[in-house]
Structure formats: structure tokens, C-alpha cells
Image (spheres, rainbow, N blue to C red):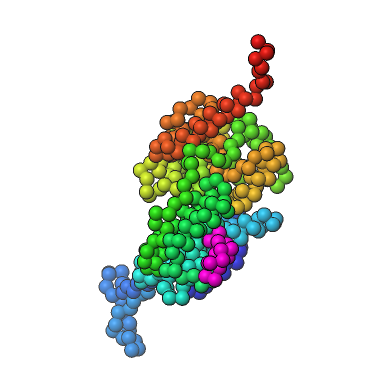
Amino acid sequence: MAKLENATKDNPRLEQRVLKDGRISLYLEYYLGRKSEPVLNEFGDPVLYTSGEMNGKPKYKVTHIRNKESLNLYLIAKPRTPFDRQQNKETLELAENIRREKEQQLKQQTKGYRLEKSKNTTFISLFQSYINDYTKCDVRMLKMALRWFEEFLEVTPEYKRYKDVLKPKQITKEMIVDFTEFLKERGKGETPKSVFQRFKKVVKWAIEHSYMTTDPTKDVRITTDDQILRKDVLSTEEVVTLINTHYQGENPEIRRAFIFCCYCGLRFCDVKDLTYKNIDYSNRMLKFEQNKTKGHSANSGVVVPLNDGIMSLIGTPEKGHESDLIFNLPSHTMCLKALKHWTARAGIAKHITWHCGRHSFAVNILNNGANIKTVASLLGHSGLKHTEKYTRAVDELKQQAINSLPALNSTDF
């Protein structure tokens, strides 16, 4: 088994156990204190000490209260390749980040404790602490936001001197406006807007925890045309080509999961959490709540009908394993690397990311005659606003198809 670097006072502790299928399951064990109860005899009367200083006093037994929480994270028991070892490393890092966040939550509940506030706390260290405790699927974008903000301070002469000493309360609206201009020059497409949204999450958190008193990001925005589909999409022919492409060392879990996204339109953060309980086998339906909107949208639930091919892709669980993950995926980074290698082998000269599977699903079913309301429902959109960009993409594809025909000249008639 893998060796876990647990501190003796960690609560919860990160633990592991070997499953029947050979994988190592990671879980958290909480210590919730102890309780003392009198020892009773068969008649329900207290048992008394009969000698020594405690003579005549009731005996007590001490029970230590512990609770376990599964993380649905698994290690490869005997990693044989660099890919396996890297996957184990990233899984352990994710598990430890979750453990730290859970520890903070437990301390908050029991002691009202949170990150110790200090006049010497810099915004960069605060940002990093926020990332360390963050467990949601967009942590990669948060890391990018921190990296780009550090780069902004480094390359901007008037702010360079603040790089290692900038306090949260020293951030001004003028600095934020300059940062947004830097983002628009640094990134492309929707990336600047996405990075700034994550940056604002950290600022909001800092205000809620009294590190800042005012919001310097208020009324500062990066706007983009949300109705333009900027990512590449796979045509139905390219999806078939991808399915028929194999290579040595491919990860079958990544392969199955991405094909599933192309046929059902799921995001990476949703497909990685799917269990067999999400499948209604009798009615051949997939039912799940979107991680992106769960808890703050009445339309977070999605229902997708399944056909024979998709059902065979999913498979059926062994008895008693209905709570198991359908796809045992490594980190998002590892999945992207595998996808890049796979599309290159298939001869697809497009920049295909995991989210392109979702976009491809929407464009392809629209091309095949689905109406926009049906597509919005299958994607879990609360309205048609976010779905309209796919109809525009379909219109562009139709125009490209017409333009691909041989040119006509008036002299031909």
C-alpha cells in the first residue's frame, strides 16, 4: 500500500484500504471525541469496584467516537509506469487538499476557527491558502488566476515592488482595471473572463473573512460575446474516426468517458463523478445533478435518454457495487494529455479539449434535426441563451458546406 504522510494531530486523518478488485480506496477518519458510560451488569445495575481506592465506586467504560467518509478516490496498488505513478501522486494531492478543507470545516464548527488573520498576511499567500483548501473542479482556473496575477505584478513597473508584500487592503480599483487589461492581452477567447471570475471569488472570500473591507473588483468587468462558440467541435465523422482509433498504452477509462461525453453532452466535472446509481436501467435513462449549478439553480437536474450503444458503454455493476464510479478517471491534466495524444493519432488537426465533447454533442444533434429546446434540456441549460451559440455554429457549418461547392461564374449560364 502507498505510504500516507499523516501528521499525528490531523483530524480528519487520510486513510486507505485495499478493495477486492485490487485498488486502494482513500477515505477520511474523523475523531469526534469520547464518551464515558457506566458499566452495567445483566440486570442493568452499575458494576462497582471491589478493592483499592475506587472500592464501592461504579466502573466506567470510555468509547472513542470515530466516523469515516469515503472520498471516491482510488490509487493503483502496484504502479508500473510513469503514468501510473503520476496518477497516484495527483490523486494523493487531491485527497490531501480535500482533507485540509474538511479539517477547516470541522474547526469552524467546533471552535469557530478559520485561517489566522495577521497584519502581515499578503494577498498572494492568502490566495494560495484559498487554493490549498479548494476542492471544486475549477481549481485549475484558480491556479491560473494566481499565476497571471503574479505575472501582472512582475511585468507592471508601478506594481512590481508590491509583488512579495502586497496586502489585501492595498489592492485598489485602479490596479484591478489594469489587471483586466493585462488579462485581455495575455489570454484569448473566454479565458480572460473566466480567470477574472475566479480572481473575484478570492476577493469575495477575503471580504467575507475580514481580510478586506471594500471590493476593488466591484463594477469592473471583462465582457465577451457569449453567443460565439470559440472551441473546436468534432463532426460525427470525426467522432467515429476517434472511436476507431486505438494506440498502445491508451487508457480505456479515458476513452470510454470521452466517447460518453460526445454522446451525452456531459462536462468533465460531471462525468468523473457518475456512479451506477445515476443510471435508471429499467427506463434506460441517465439522471444526475450538474456540479456547476447544484445548490444554486432549480434546473441543475438533467435527464438524458440512453440507447443500446450508450448502455453498452456504461455496462452494469456487480451486486453491491451500485455506488461505484462508472469511469475511474485520473486528474483533469492527465485526461487532457491522453485526449491530445488520441486525437493526434486519429489525424484530427483540431485543438480538442474535454469540453469539446459537450460542444460536439450539441452541434451534432442540432445538425441532425433536434430543436433548440431539446438541446437546452439535454445540456441542462436553464434557458435558451447559452444554447443559441450552438445554432450559430450550425449556421456557420452550413455556410461552409455551401461555400465548399465549385464556384459558379455568370458566363457558365
- For the question of whether residue 304 can be seen, the reply is no
Q: Height in image: 233 above or below 81?
A: above
Residue closer to the observer: 137 or 315: 137
Residue drawn at x 56%, y 66% as measured from the top left: 157
Answer whether residue 150 is magenta in the image: yes
374 with respect to 87 (left or right):
left
Classify residue 238 by image quadrant: top right
Q: Residue furthest top?
A: 413
Q: Please state the horizontal and vertical placement of residue 383, each as a whole percent of the image.
A: 39, 37
Percent position (x, y) of residue 357? 56, 39
Residue at image point 60% right, 23% down: 402
Where 7 sits versus 136, above or below?
A: below
Q: Decide which of 131, 391 is in the foreground and name it.
A: 391
Q: Which residues are magenta?
A: 148-162
Q: Residue furthest right?
A: 248
Tell me what residue is drawn at x 57 percent, y 41 percent. 231
Q: Main secondary structure of the magenta part?
A: helix
Q: How many numbered callouts? A: 0
Identity of the residue drawn at 64% across and 58% down = 86
Residue 409 belongs to the span the image colors magenta: no
Image position of 42 (left or right of 88): left
Q: Quadrant of residue 381?
A: top left
Q: Is residue 73 above or below residue 59?
A: above
Can residue 218 be seen here? The reply is yes
Residue positioned most to the bottom: 53
